[in-house]
Image (cartoon, rainbow, N blue to C red):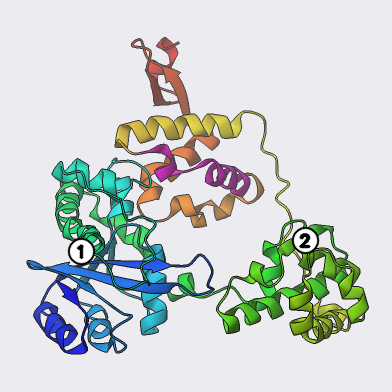
Amino acid sequence: MYITTEEDLIALCERLKQSTVLALDTEFVREKTYYHRLGLIQVASDGVCAVIDPIQIRNLDPFLDLIRNPKTTKVFHAARQDLEILYRLSGDVVRPVFDTQIAASVVGWGQQISFLKIVHKVTGKKIHKSETYTDWCRRPLSENQIEYALDDVRYLFPVYEKLIKVLRKLSREEWLADEFKFLEDPESFEPPGPKKLFMRIKNVRSLAPRNLAVMCELTAWRQQEAQTRDCLAKHIIRDESLLEIARKAPRDEQGLDHIRGFHRKEAARSSKEILAAIQRGLKMPEDQIPRLPELDVYRSPPGVEELLAAYVQVRAAELKVEPTVLADRKKIHDFVKCYDQNKSSIEEHFLYRGWRKEGIGTLLHSVLKGERCLTISEEGQLQVLPMDSDNSKSSS
């Protein structure tokens, strides 16, 4: 079903408004624009499978009202960008959410499994990704393109239903409550504050404090300009050129002309605004000059993080999940640092939240306290034992 009129959209949403579960996806383009250019919205439920054309239908309120219903579970695969688009359209987060990619990771189907692979695993069908690089904002769309888009929600339902069964069998439904919090938090979709954008620039730490203030103003100006023009920030001025402008802080247009990579067309358009931003940075009060976060220079004792990583491997094998689902090397490093520098705060750490506390956090904590050891069984398998266990004495 291809929905191209507001009347048909109203009728579709009327059919779907009693649904308790909606499968959703979007198709978009964002190679050259600041904002996603939405090309299609796909939705399925209760035997209904439809593609909504947001280019031909300007008023999407009936659909937005549908997804605002807190009693309807909205199912996505790899939901982050879809939710960002819908957040901007509706002005609010979509909730409750179920992400099949995340759910697949906690039942042991692999970390960041693709939609193609998860559909094949559940249904045995091989869906084709022949339209991956389609310009979804160009019209008309072919029948093949529409069918391709429909497949993304048509097969999402059986994947969702299978995952629910597996989650219940493993008693891991509660695991997902913590995993989905990020997707239902409005702050996850808010752009970074304009005065913090400079921290994303490579080699920004090479700048002196006053030049850092200039960089702060320049990146804030560039981001606002990118939003106004609906283009990528790097298409206005590349990071390398912006860094050089901040370093040299030219006072006039002649000085800007000597900046490598600052094109004449942009200079003619934006020189006054750029020079004004430079001046704001140079005149910024000392107590307002931005500070970069301190570099993580912590070094754990040799072998400690490697040892904990081995424990994560063992525990992941027990739970039949990927080790990175429990704790990647960055979180292991942070856990050791937290324990070493402030033992009393360990229970506030990420690995002590929700299901991860029982899943891995308490185990790693007991290892750091010297209460557990890693041994090799007679069968040659790694195993975790209490330090006073008789088994540990007989293992090699």
User: Is residue 210 in view from this perspective?
Assistant: no
| Res. 356 mark | none
Q: Position of residue 35 (x, y in %)?
A: 49, 75
Q: Which quadrant of the view contains residue 280?
A: bottom right
Q: Position of residue 326 (x, y in %)?
A: 41, 43
Q: Quadrant of the C terminus?
A: top left
User: Is residue 255 in view from this perspective?
Assistant: yes
| Contact between labelled residues 2 and 1, with CB atoms less than 8 Å apart | no
- Mark 1–mark 2 distance (CA, rounded to whole Å): 49 Å
Q: Amino acid at mark 1?
A: Glu
Q: Amino acid at mark 2?
A: Val
Q: Tell me if mark 1 has few (under 14), some (14-19) or many (20+) residues whose alpha carbon lies within 10 angstroms of its own.
A: few
Q: Nearer the viewer, residue 247 or 258?
A: 258
Q: Nearer the viewer, residue 128 or 305?
A: 128
Name the residue at 20% across, 49% down: 167
Instruction: Determine whether 245 is above or below 377 in the image.
Output: below
Name the residue at 12% across, 74% down: 19
Find disc 2 in the rendering and name its residue: 204
Specify start and end residues of the magenta stretch as a single range. Answer: 322-339
Position of residue 288 in the picture relative to residue 372 (left or right): right
| Res. 143 mark | 1
